[in-house]
Amino acid sequence: MSGIDLPPDVLDAIAAPPEDREPIVRQELAVSLYREGYLSFGKARELAGLSKAKFHQLLGEREVERHYTEADLALDIEYAHE
């Protein structure tokens, strides 16, 4: 995973231990980009560095509505019937 290039003074201004700052930025960015529809669930989860379950949990904590289309539902129903 490559690092996110932020100005050092911005990263230092995050009120968290130094080792937690980049993961916080990644998660916040991932949630925001997913919420706005710029990233899919999978890519946002990848950016956040979280498992599917943990990213679902994070989205729930942030009250972010999941992007789930009728086409997604049809695929899930088809899969369930197999």
Image (spheres, rainbow, N blue to C red):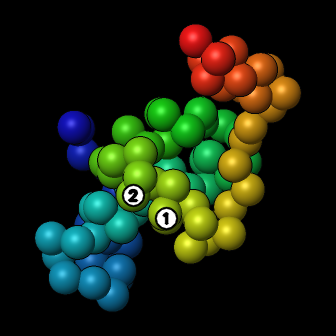
Is any part of residue 47 visible from this angle?
A: no
Q: Quadrant of the C terminus?
A: top right
Q: Identify the residue at image location x=51%, y=55%.
A: 56
**Label 2 crowd bin: few (<14), some (14–19), many (20+), radius 10 Å:** few
Tell me which corner region of the image, top left, top right, bottom left or bottom right, holds residue 45.
Answer: top left
Per the image, the residue denoted by label 2 is: 54
Q: Identify the residue at image location x=23%, y=38%.
A: 2
Q: Identify the residue at image location x=84%, y=27%.
A: 70
| Depth order, front residue of 22/45 | 45
Is any part of residue 33 visible from this angle?
A: yes
Residue 81 image offset from top left, x and y in percent = 64, 17
Q: Left or right of 55: which side holds 78?
A: right
Q: Left or right of 74: which side holds 8?
A: left
Amino acid type at circle 2 is: Lys
Q: Quadrant of the N terminus?
A: top left
Amino acid type at circle 1 is: Leu
Q: Identify the residue at image location x=61%, y=23%.
A: 80
2 and 1 marks in contact (CB < 8 Å)? yes
Q: Left or right of 47: which side holds 60?
A: right
Per the image, the residue denoted by label 1 is: 58
Q: Secondary structure at mark 1?
A: helix
Residue 49 image offset from top left, x and y in percent = 31, 48
Q: Left or right of 48: which side holds 1?
A: left
Please give the label number shown on residue 3.
none
